[in-house]
Image: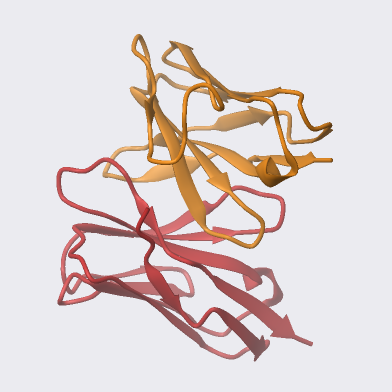
Chain colours: A red, B orange
Amino acid sequence: GQQLNQSPQSMFIQEGEDVSMNCTSSSIFNTWLWYKQDPGEGPVLLIALYKAGELTSNGRLTAQFGITRKDSFLNISASIPSDVGIYFCAGRRFGNEKLTFGTGTRLTIIP
Amino acid sequence: SAVISQKPSRDICQRGTSLTIQCQVDSQVTMMFWYRQQPGQSLTLIATANQGSEATYESGFVIDKFPISRPNLTFSTLTVSNMSPEDSSIYLCSVGGGQEKLFFGSGTQLSVL
């Protein structure tokens, strides 16, 4: 099935740095969701976005629904060790209950 | 959000055997979804399980290999049949949570020798 392209594939940052990642598609989506997955766990929902241009925050996390409806962005400010993990975007088209998942961005914090 | 419990959390199995994974939700839900996550990969939908009807499988997945039961609105099982090492993956149960959100269980880590 189709997957969304996430960039970057992996990131190595120092604690305290800000993080930006994005998710792009050739198709229009009506809902964007961002998840974080820790090793050995299922993905945990971070933020949900429902309309173009929407900007939503969850603590140090901020996500945006792209104006073209073909992309979405996630920013993490002042990263901390517990931010380590894999971040997945997921999109849903109008009238379709299925989610399409991104390829994932692996975040590593360098001591 | 719903509380989703999956059992077992992990297992190591011999090729040719079958494993049944259980998913229990703390509230009634219409649709339950089963995903597979191969090592280092993203999530791929296996099938959608509706109570009272046969599961709907995605392209590349068949009922003989991944039979699913959905006896009520809070429970589902996925069986991985006649396993081979290629079936080594994380298997995840998920449910809708309103406002088009999807919530996941903690997953079952399967290794096939």
Task: In the rendered view, tell whether residue B37 sits above or below residue A72.
Answer: above
Tell me: A46 left or right of B113: left
Quarter of the figure with the C terminus of chain A: bottom right
Q: Residue at x 17, y 64 (%)?
A: A28
Tell me the residue at 71%/44% (across/down): B88
In this rendering, the count of numbered labels is 0
The front one of B82 and B34 is B82
Task: Locate residue B112, reporting x and y percent.
Answer: 78, 39
Residue B39 at what x, y percent from top left? 67, 57
Q: Is residue B109 visible?
A: yes
x, y percent for residue B79 = 61, 23
Which residue corresponds to the image point at 40% horizontal and 19% vertical from the top-left? Answer: B28
- Residue at image coords 34%, 49%: A99
Can residue B1 be seen here? no
Residue B61 screen position, x and y as percent:
47, 35
Give the left or right position of residue A25, taking residue B102 as reference: left
Q: In this rendering, is residue A39 above or below A5? A: above
Q: Quadrant of residue B57?
A: top left
